[in-house]
Amino acid sequence: MHAYATVTQAGLDNPRTSAEKIDETLKQYLLYSRPVYIEVPVDMVVKPVSRLRPESPSVTSEGEKDEASDAVFRLVLQKTVLFIGEGSFQMTVQEITSIVRHSLDVTIFVINNDGCPIDRSTHGRLFGAKEVIYTRSAKTWRDLKHVLEDEGLLRGKELRMVEIFLGREDFPKGPLLHYLEAQRQAE
């Protein structure tokens, strides 16, 4: 037996109609909780064009090509706003380090609907899992001791997850700690 999911998709192939397509796609997501896909070509550059001159600007000289390249670079440096579901976000969260490393101006809105609608619609509401999953967190040694003695952790047979909080610069002894010390001295 197959389950089907209704999705909304927007292919952004024209800068003049892209905003309207994005609005309609996000409306479908927000009103009907449908999964959405927005395809943005990597070579799509938005350059304002007068209503009186709707044709695309042509690039002919080397100077104009440099100007066009600069415009693309400026677009990259502009603010980016990302709306992403928490299921999709878990697949791309590692890119946050790239955003931080390159000092990009990005705002991320994580839309949490308690799971991936596509997976729930095809694999069942709980993905075949039980309603209750064992999760705990420990911020102190005492918390960790309680978790390690918990019957749910000791006797459980399914997924069990424990989140342990450490200090930002809590490094194990070895090369990583040496790199951290070198960074501290260089500051």
Image: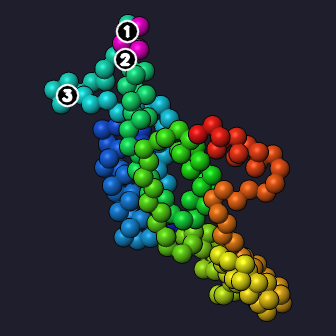
Q: Is residue 43 above or below residue 140?
A: above
Q: What is the C-alpha distance between the residues marked 2 and 3?
A: 18 Å
Q: Which mark is residue 67?
A: 2
Which residue is at a point 31% across and 20% down the rendered structure image?
Answer: 57
- The outermost residue toward the bottom is 151
- Residue 147 can be seen, yes or no: no
Depth check: give the residue in front, 141 or 157.
141
Q: Nearer the viewer, residue 87 or 145?
A: 145
The single residue placed furthest to the top in the displayed view is 61
Range of residues picked out in magenta? 62-67
Q: Nearer the viewer, mark 2 or mark 3?
A: 2
Gap between marks 1 and 3 measured at Cα: 21 Å
Q: Residue at x 43, y 21 (%)?
A: 69
Residue identifier under label 1: 63
Pointer 3 residue: 50
Secondary structure of residue under mark 1: helix
Q: Is residue 152 left or right of 63 when viewed as pictured?
A: right
In the image, what residue type sits under mark 2? Glu
Callout 1: 10 Å neighbours few (<14), some, many (20+)? few
3 drawn magenta: no
Q: Is residue 143 left or right of residue 80?
A: right
Label 2 close to label 1 by CB (< 8 Å): yes
